[in-house]
Amino acid sequence: MTDRLSNADLRRLFIHQHALSGSPGGPLTRDGLDALIGWLGFVQVDTISTLEQAHHHILFTRANGYRKSLLKHLLEKRRSLFEHWTHDASIIPTRFYPYWKPRFRRYKARMDAAPHWDQRFAGRRDAVLEEMRRRVEAEGATTSRDVTPDDTEERGTWWGWTPSKTALEYLWRSGELAVAGRRGFAKVYDLSHRVIPAEHHDPEPDHAAFVDWCGREAIARLAVATHGEIARFFDSISPAEAQTWCESAGGNTLRRIEIELADGSLREVWARPDVLALAKDAPEPPARVRFLSPFDPMIRERERTQRLFGFDYRFEAFVPAAKRVYGYYVLPMLERDRLVGRIELKAHRDRGDLEVRGLWMEPRVRASKARDARIEAEIERWRAFTGMERVVR
């Protein structure tokens, strides 16, 4: 008989695996932040700052003692984190660096085969790449702003990238360069061996070891998943590779269980061997309300969020205004083990206002003074973190 997780146990476990079951209060050290990002596996980076940039939002949601200077230190001084791609631009534990080498090769092959990348080099691909290699080798840390004045007349329409900017991105995505820091939000590039500590420059793993690592690291964090969710966790292997890995993994690595979805239906999925003990030990999440980033890993897969939590979420920033149901930058609200509503906040940094632009509770979620107080407390926490002077409605 296949073991089963109830939907309540599944939600509690899933929230715990995403580091949202503990109280986010209290101080946070550099080591604590390192451990938190390691627990999550990566943190997505995004430039939208309607409320706060995604990486800062994700970390503050889990640790209200988070400060941006802590992350900057780990990225630029300790070098225990590096920037590259998972499903999107992300901050990743540097100990994972050897397992990004197959991705570097894959990116290089894709860029070499793509006509639009060749077009961005304005017909001077080899010369521009060699010039950027020489320049970074000789001059050290470099931003696109340092090099683009040389070829501004060749600026294209693809996000305004010049051949020099294209070369820096090409060399970063293919692993020759690494992000050494940021000036504002602009990446500062340097040679990888000058950024990534020597102990992480292990040889590239063979393909079988690479697939096995991706599968193990994904299921360790998800606890339960389909083979497609395992593939998409780092976006490093294909669904077919993940399926083969799941089917060939031994009982010490994976097992099959049934999970109850939010609508009461059952689904068979892959799970960690210790999943039942994990679910039993997963603590009840705190009563306080938390506003999740649209890029939060817990809600990253919208269909999974619908299946597990019965919460239909769409990020509408890229939806034409007339077609939006809620708003441009609407945040799901997590209370205990439920997604109970959504809120739209905007930080007006020019005038010091945190604007509450909308608040919507889910059907069958009752209003109460206690819940209203928890929402107001979270709004106040965000006012303080964003440095706004007042809350306006």
Image (tube, rainbow, N blue to C red):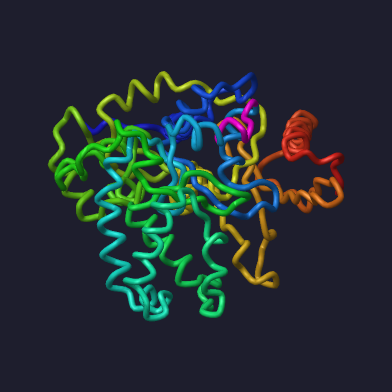
Horizontal placement of 210 versus 303: left or right?
A: left
Q: Is residue 174 visible?
A: yes
**Residue 373: quarter of image:** top right
127 w.r.t. 87: above or below: below
Residue 12 visible:
no
Residue 161 percent location from the top left of the image: 51, 70
Q: Position of residue 33 (x, y in %)?
A: 52, 27
Magenta segment boundaries in residue numbering: 65-71
Question: Looking at the image, which residue is at 47% across and 44% down?
Answer: 180
Based on the picture, tell me whether residue 67 belongs to the magenta stretch. Answer: yes
Look at the picture and state if 102 lies above or below 14: below
Give the residue at x 64% y 22%.
25
Measured as percent of width and height from the top left, residue 40 is found at 44, 35
| Residue 287 among those drawn in magenta | no
Residue 276: which quarter of the image?
Answer: top left
Comparing 223 with 203, the one in front is 203
Image quarter of the N terminus: top left
Image coordinates for residue 298, horizontal then vertical, percent: 49, 41
Q: Residue shown at 55%/80% (left/top)? A: 153
State the residue in front, 70 or 25.
70
